[in-house]
């Protein structure tokens, strides 16, 4: 840009500068991005704002986009033991954490070991086994839950434990859901890591275990974190299996207690929104906290200089 053009540009008003920058192509792109953000952000905003509304505001015919005041009645009903409609939501949060965190960790460990074996070791039928594992995941959970419940019930009778209201049994069923796709994800990622890197480690004196621990797993951090987030989200949000295996209100996870609040005799939509907000926040914080590691790992690639 010439000196005269710079002077002319500096004399322009902000409106003139915007008009000069905003072409039809950029305008259409901005409109599309705005609509996309509205579709994503507005439901989340409506959920949070509704948790602070009164029953009249949330149940009225005219929508109230901004509550008149930030009322905490819904949150008190969830957490305050002195509230007449106390739901003991903190216990449900603890139950969900007890299930979700071990499920995510165990799924990462088991899937990493199995995926490495399939990606690196040569044995007959490994592709058939991998495709068979993935085929299991294609069946909806409502079809698998009946034989799975029967199998777990038989194990319970054989070893003397109760399958109902047992968080350990529920964790086992969640692993049955998360391991197939976690294994498939990690197999494909391990195959992208050049085998020459591991061979170099073996030549330098590392054992196979040392190569896995010092070379392969650090390079697979993006995939491991993705599997961790995926398994945690499955266990955190799962409803069907928890609904079947949990009967006592003291053992309810968050999806079950939210369903119980929604199905209460007196409508409690603002309490449902408050519980849903609390249920959503940990997943968002987990993703935002892990995003940096995901970006760094993906940018680094499989081969580092």
Image (cartoon, helix red, strand yellow):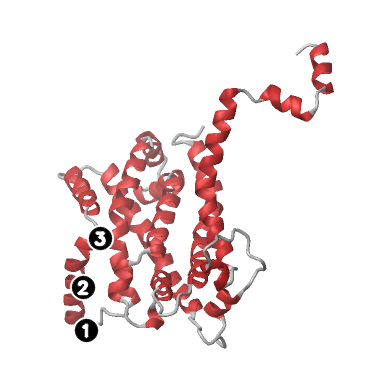
Q: Secondary structure at mark 2?
A: helix
Q: Secondary structure at mark 1?
A: loop
Instruction: Residue lying at the far front in this picture: please name it.
Output: 61
Q: Which residue is mark 1?
A: 160
Comparing 192 with 14, the one in front is 14
Along the polypeptide, which appears first: circle 2 or circle 1? 2
State the residue at coordinates (46%, 48%): 221
Comparing 14 with 210, the one in front is 14
State the residue at coordinates (40%, 52%): 227
Along the polypeptide, which appears first: circle 1 or circle 3? 3
* Spatial CA span between label 2 and label 1: 11 Å
User: On residue 141, which mark appears?
Assistant: 3
User: On residue 152, which mark appears?
Assistant: 2
Q: Is residue 58 left or right of residue 195?
A: right
Image location (x, y in percent) of residue 232: 42, 60
Along the polypeptide, which appears first: circle 2 or circle 3? 3
Image location (x, y in percent) of residue 294: 50, 45
Q: Quadrant of residue 235?
A: bottom left
Residues at discs 2 and 1 in contact (Cβ within 8 Å): no
Query: How many numbered callouts?
Result: 3
Image location (x, y in percent) of residue 160: 22, 84
* Spatial CA span between label 1 and label 3: 26 Å
Q: Secondary structure at mark 3?
A: helix
Residue count near mark 2 (Cα–Cα under 10 Å), binned few <14, some 14–19, many ≥20: some
């Amino acid at each position: 840009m010439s000196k005269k053009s710079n002077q002319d540009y500096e004399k322009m008003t902000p409106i003139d500068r915007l008009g000069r920058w905003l072409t039809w192509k950029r305008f259409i792109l901005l409109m599309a991005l705005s609509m996309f953000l509205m579709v994503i952000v507005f439901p989340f905003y409506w959920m949070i704002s509704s948790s602070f509304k009164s029953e009249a505001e949330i149940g009225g015919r005219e929508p109230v986009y901004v509550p008149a005041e930030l009322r905490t009645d819904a949150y008190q009903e969830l957490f305050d033991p002195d509230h007449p409609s106390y739901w003991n939501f903190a216990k449900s949060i603890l139950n969900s954490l007890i299930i979700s965190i071990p499920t995510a960790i165990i799924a990462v460990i088991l899937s990493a070991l199995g995926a490495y074996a399939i990606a690196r070791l040569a044995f007959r039928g490994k592709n058939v086994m991998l495709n068979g594992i993935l085929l299991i995941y294609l069946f909806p959970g409502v079809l698998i839950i009946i034989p799975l419940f029967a199998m777990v019930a038989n194990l319970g009778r054989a070893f003397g434990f109760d399958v109902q209201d047992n968080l350990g049994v529920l964790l086992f069923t969640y692993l049955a859901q998360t391991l197939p796709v976690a294994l498939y994800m990690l197999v494909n990622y391990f195959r992208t890591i050049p085998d020459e890197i591991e061979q170099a480690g073996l030549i330098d004196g590392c054992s196979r275990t040392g190569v896995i621990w010092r070379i392969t797993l650090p390079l697979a951090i993006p995939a491991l974190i993705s599997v961790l987030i995926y398994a945690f989200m499955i266990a955190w949000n799962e409803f069907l299996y928890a609904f079947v295996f949990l009967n006592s209100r003291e053992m309810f996870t968050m999806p079950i207690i939210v369903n119980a609040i929604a199905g209460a005799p007196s409508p409690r939509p603002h309490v449902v929104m408050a519980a849903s907000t609390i249920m959503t926040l940990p997943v968002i914080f987990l993703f935002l906290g892990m995003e940096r590691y995901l970006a760094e790992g993906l940018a680094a690639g499989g081969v580092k200089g």
